[in-house]
Image (cartoon, helix red, strand yellow):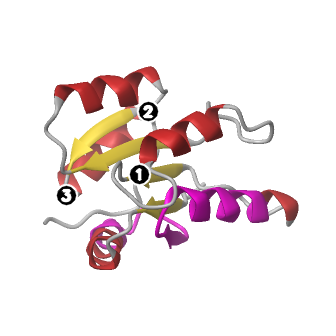
Amino acid sequence: MIPNVLLVDDEIITNIVHKSVLERTAAFGYIESACHGRQAIAFLENAISQDKPLPDYIFLDINMPVMNGFQFLEEINNHFAIDRRIVKIIVLSSSIDPKDREKARILGADHFLSKPLGTADILNILNQNGKILHRTTST
C-alpha cells in the first residue's frame, strides 16, 4: 500500500517545497496540505466522516497561528477515531530548542526533524516504518 501524507505548515512556500521533495521519491499516494492545526483536524475529521483513508504520515510544524503543532498533538492524541499506531506524526521545525524536541516527544510525535525536509529524511522514515519504496531519486 502506498502511504499518504498531510503537510501542516502555515508557510505556503514551505508546503510547496516539501510536497515537491515528497513527490520526487515517488513513494506516496496523496499529498495534502493544511495551514494550521485546526485546518488539519478538519481535514482528518472530513476524511473520517467520508470514509476516506487517513494520511499515514503527518509532517507538522510547531509555530503556527490558530492551532500550533503542540496543540494539534494534544488534540489528535485524544481523538476517538484516529489510530496513532497507524498515523505517524513527524514534527518538522526550524526550532533548535531542545525543549521543543522533548515536548514533541512527550506529546507523542514519532520523529522530530529540522527544516527543510530532504529526500534522505524521507527514506529514513520510510525504512524505519517498514514502508516499501517503488523507486527513489536522489536530492
Left or right: where 34 falls relative to 125: right
Q: Decide which of tag 3 and tag 1 comes sooner along the chain.
A: 1
Query: Label 1: few (<14), some or many (≥20) within 10 Å?
Result: many
Choose between 114 and 22: the one closer to the eye. Answer: 114
Say what secondary structure mark 3 lies in.
loop
Say what secondary structure mark 1 lies in.
strand
Choose between 74 and 111: the one closer to the eye. Answer: 74
Vertical placement of 95 versus 24: above or below? above
Residue under the point 49% across and 27% down: 108
Q: Would residue 30 be seen by someone viewing this image from the given angle?
A: yes
| Badge nearest the viewer, 3 or 1 | 1
Vertical placement of 48 versus 82: above or below? below
Left or right: where 90 falls relative to 122: right
Q: Give the CA separation, mark 3 to mark 1.
A: 15 Å
Residue under the point 39% across and 58% down: 64
Q: Mark 2 points at which residue?
A: 109
Magenta highlight range: 21-47
Q: Does the magenta stretch include residue 127?
A: no
Q: Give the CA separation, mark 2 to mark 3.
A: 19 Å
Measured as percent of width and height from the top left, residue 15 is found at 35, 72
Task: Tell me which corner region of the image, top left, top right, bottom left or bottom right, holds residue 82.
Answer: top right
Give residue 118's mark. Answer: 3
Measured as percent of width and height from the top left, residue 62 is found at 35, 48
> Mark 3: which amino acid?
Gly
Where is the C terminus found, in terms of image quarters?
bottom left
Whether label 2 touches label 1, CB < 8 Å:
yes
Left or right: where 106 falls relative to 122: right
Left or right: where 59 falls relative to 120: right
Choose between 100 and 30: the one closer to the eye. Answer: 100
Vertical placement of 90 versus 119: above or below? above
Q: Name the residue under label 1.
A: 60
Task: Tell me which corner region of the image, top left, top right, bottom left or bottom right, holds residue 111.
Answer: top left
